[in-house]
Amino acid sequence: MSTQNPAADVSPKPVAAPPSKKGGMSDLAKAEERLAYLLLLPTLVILFLIAIYPLGSVFYYSTTDRRFASSQATEFVGLDNYQQLLNMTVRELPRQLDEAGQPAVDPDTGEALYARPNEVLITDDGPRYRDVTTFNLLGKRYVLGATDRDFIDATLATIIFTVLSVVLETVLGLGVAMVVNSNFAGRGPLRVLMLLPWAIPTAVSSRMWEFMFDPTRRGFFNVVSQKLGLTDGQVSWLTERAFQLPAMIAIDVWKTTPFMALLLLAGLQLIPSDIYEAADVDGASKFRQFWQLTLPLLRPTMAVALIFRTLDAVRVFDLFQIVLAEKRYSMASFAYYELIKNQKMGYASAASVIIFLLIFIFAVVYMRALGVSDEQ
Amino acid sequence: MNNNILGKIVFYLLVVVVVIYLIFPFYWMLNTSFKSEAQLQMTPATFVPRDPGGTGAIDFTLKNYQAVFQNDTFLRGLLNSLIVAGVTTFIALVVGSFAAFALGKLRFRGKTPSLYLILAMTMFPQVAVLTGLYAVINALRIPAIPAMILSYMIFTLPFTVWVLTSFFRGLPMEIMQSAQVDGATPFQTFRMILLPLTMPALVTTGLLAFIAAWNEYLFALTFTSVEPQSRTVPVAIALFTGQVARQEPFGEIMAASVVVTIPLLILVLIFQNKIIAGLTAGAVKG
């Protein structure tokens, strides 16, 4: 158990000269300052080596076509990687025409038929767009095309996942926190139970839920949904696009709501109970007490919890990589596969930079919106 | 009065719903881990392991657990995880408490920027440095286990420094002054007087650092991709393959998951108050 400062050995000066009585404050202050720098040094060196320098090199790689584990010379490509990742277009899909030149409809359903996305996206000149998704707006149908369909899809998936899971976790977390905040028998065991989903590795919870989402009636969700008469019990929850994100959100909500609830619970316990007594005397309803006392007083705690959760959700990796692998990407798992499988280091770095900037924007917006920046 | 009883019933119903929601996936994991391959293939899946012959009798098997404890990749993963998480925690506490002492109790120029740097680092997204860090580790030819230990400092060290700094700051200044009067250097004061007082905070931050390092997946997966013998438990479970190729051995995967969950359950049972205090330290003071 070495409590000796490891950096002291390389220092040319003694850690702290014994303060001489005549030296006065300035010598003592200098010695104190020197000691402070020495003590901070290991932390700063480690953080520089593993975070700041790599971050700088990620920014640099993102402007090159560097490949991983390759002897091929690396060339500077400017913003080409970013252009490839982010280049998008929205084009209107024209109606299909029947033989008579009239807009065609599906003979079975009566729904309008539109041209296939590739017909409007692929042109002889210009970038090669591929369709990400189609959507309706004001009675017309549009297609979103992107040069890197997977990355844009990963970005949309990550944003939808982040917004929905954080909102659900906050609302449910607040509910659970208020339940646990009341004094009742069994509160202690419940708190242990709440820590458990947070404490287990995401790898474990992902595998657990993966089997519950099994595409046959071996899986819990297929058994239940069939018993309720909702499905035929053969739903591929993790392969069908419509179910992928809801499944991811369900798993994340299970794992993280208790954590959210514990944070909010700590905030609730800081609120003195006599203000509620006063509100009772004034005849304020429980509902009004919640909106006008609890929520405002909980705001600082909620702000911090929201920031941490959002930043965590934007960089989601474990869950997507384990449960969906390459069936659907999050931004982080996209970057991982580009690096490890495709060995495209420059390209993966550009994706990482975009994640970094997105997280940065989320953090700044939150701090502004919730007013936590100056009060600290 | 009637209203009161009704309220109580609704309240306890809510509690029951929350409890079932929290427990059920664990129950399903346990249930699956006790099923044989034949029982796993039964449709619809049974809520307790039942005899596949059709008698419906309850029938547990421990075969999955036997397989897991004979699985070298998994056992090695447990050992690797223990080493990585243990050493990470130790280094983070030693290095972190130095920095926290300086930031919490000493006066020096550049303190505020240092504090902001550390705070910003606690929110740092690991994936943002993945490619750069991998390049550093390859360039320095660091093997996977030390590479994981080093890289885990990214999320353990800033957090440790941050929590310990606020703890040191809360210790009364008189302790330092009286030690100084007695002729102790600031470092002696730190080592012999402040550090023992910090023990509770060290336990709390150490636990959180250990759990975070034990659970980490992104760096572990990346750095062990060419070094499978260094895989940690989360990677081993994510990549778990059985004797028979193609078919995913969910019985064994769930048994392995149970084995990993039990020590964490024990940690949580023993240290629940410390863990909650550590988790909420940042949030509530914020």
Image (cartoon, rainbow, N blue to C red):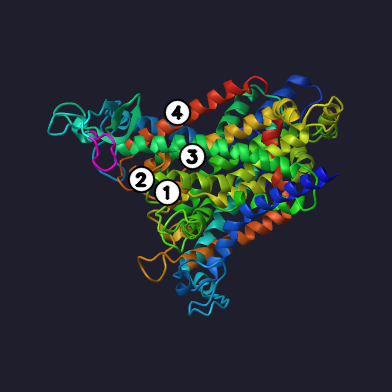
Q: Do labels 4 and 1 share a chain?
A: yes
Relative image position of residue A315 (x, y in whole percent): 48, 38
Q: Are marks 3 and 2 on the same chain?
A: no
Relative image position of residue A188 (x, y in whole percent): 76, 51
Q: Which of marks 4 and 2 is nearer the N terminus?
A: 2
- Regarding residue A67, the answer to whether it shows in the image is yes
Range of residues picked out in magenta: A105-114
On whether residue A259 falls in the magenta region, the answer is no
Relative image position of residue A159 (x, y in whole percent): 45, 34
Q: Distance between the residues labelled 4 and 3?
A: 13 Å
Kindly state the secondary structure of the residue where label 3 is placed.
helix
Q: Which of marks 2 and 1 is nearer the N terminus?
A: 1
Type of secondary structure dominating the magenta stretch: loop
The residue carrying mark 4 is A357
Q: How far apart are marks 2 and 1 (CA)?
A: 9 Å
Label 2 Cα crowd, 10 Å radius (few <14 / some 14-19 / many 20+): some
